[in-house]
């Protein structure tokens, strides 16, 4: 298995632009999680899905952030409009039963 | 609310010596506990978990952790450290009911000196 796949690995954009991060979970995993990692705030859960349905989005910082999971093999995290404070590493993780999670390599986002 | 504390920002140990990375948690009800490791520019990798049963849990790469309910701790241990163990280690906790939200600690950087 290729593991969790994220794209792009690096994204540099200008303030105000729309950013879309993509994730392909491990096949057969029913849970998908989006995290943000920064030096100041550590690893924060943004949202998680179970069977493609958003279950808890309480960590989504504001309305500029949105996430979708149209099918079991694909999810997106969108930021519109982006701001410099959104600069971070964004991780996607998947889990079969909701216990241990398998993380992707992350997307390093820089908003200028 | 659930929370995790990793009291040490960094742990230094000589190669071949035993290592301990500390973790305490707070959660209502029974916890599910996890350890993950992160190497530079990589995602987190699962090491081990405690769900129920034996308080001593064995995981990947020779790591183990002991669940202590009275002290609300879940310290990570290894009998003999390797230089390649140098990385960032995260403890995480989840409630056993009411959702799958997992809270991660701030992380402890382990440095193993040759």
Image (spheres, coloured by chain):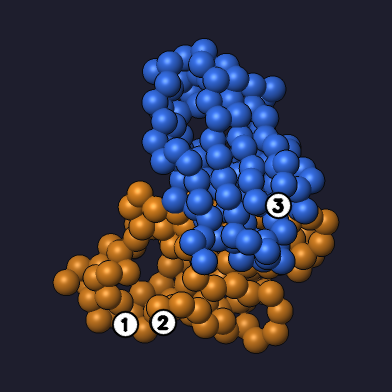
Chain colours: A blue, B orange
Is B90 placed above or below A69 here?
Answer: below
Q: Which residue is mark 1?
A: B80
Q: Is residue B33 above or below residue A109?
A: below
Task: Name the residue at 44% across, 62% down.
Answer: B37
Task: Give neighbour class at mark 1: few <14, some 14-19, many 20+ (Cα, 10 Å).
Answer: some
Q: Residue furthest bottom?
A: B54
Query: Pointer 3: what residue?
Result: A72
Dots 2 and 1: beta carbons under 8 Å? Answer: yes
Query: What residue is at 41 percent from the left and 41 percent from the top?
Result: A9
The chain identifier of the residue carrying mark 1 reads B
Q: Nearer the viewer, residue B49 or A8?
A: A8
- In the displayed structure, B65 sits above or below A4; it is below
Compared to residue B69, the image places residue A65 above or below, namely above
**Pointer 3 indicates a residue of which chain?**
A
Q: Residue B106: where, in percent of width, then height?
A: 49, 50
> Is B4 situated left or right of B9 in this image?
right
Given contact means CB atoms under 8 Å apart, are the residues at marks 3 and 2 in contact? no
Q: Secondary structure at mark 3?
A: loop
Distance from disc 1 to disc 3, alpha carbons, whole Å, reads 41 Å
Residue B13 is situated, as x and y percent measured from the top left of the image, at 27, 70
The label nearer to you, 3 versus 2, is: 3
| Residue A92 appears anywhere in the view | yes
Give the label on residue B62, or none.
Answer: 2
The answer to whether B98 appears left or right of A1 in the picture is right
């Amino acid at each position: 298995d290729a593991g969790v796949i994220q794209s792009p690995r690096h994204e540099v954009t200008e303030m105000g632009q729309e950013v879309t991060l993509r994730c392909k979970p491990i096949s057969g995993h029913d849970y998908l999680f989006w995290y943000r990692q920064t030096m100041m705030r550590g690893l924060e859960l943004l949202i998680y899905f179970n069977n493609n349905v958003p279950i808890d989005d309480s960590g989504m910082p504001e309305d500029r952030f949105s996430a979708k999971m149209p099918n079991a093999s694909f999810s997106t995290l969108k930021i519109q409009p982006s701001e410099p404070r959104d600069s971070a590493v964004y991780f996607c993780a998947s889990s079969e039963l909701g216990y241990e999670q398998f993380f992707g390599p992350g997307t390093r986002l820089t908003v200028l | 609310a659930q929370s995790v504390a990793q009291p040490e920002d960094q742990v230094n140990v000589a190669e071949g010596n035993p290592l301990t990375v500390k973790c305490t948690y707070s959660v209502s009800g029974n916890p599910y506990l996890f350890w993950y490791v992160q190497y530079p520019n990589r995602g987190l990798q699962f090491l081990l978990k405690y769900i129920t049963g034996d308080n001593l849990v064995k995981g990947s790469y020779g790591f183990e952790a002991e669940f202590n309910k009275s002290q609300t701790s879940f310290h990570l241990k290894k009998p003999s450290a390797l230089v390649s163990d140098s990385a960032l280690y995260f403890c995480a906790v989840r409630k056993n009911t009411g959702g799958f939200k997992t809270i991660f600690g701030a992380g402890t950087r382990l440095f193993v000196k040759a």
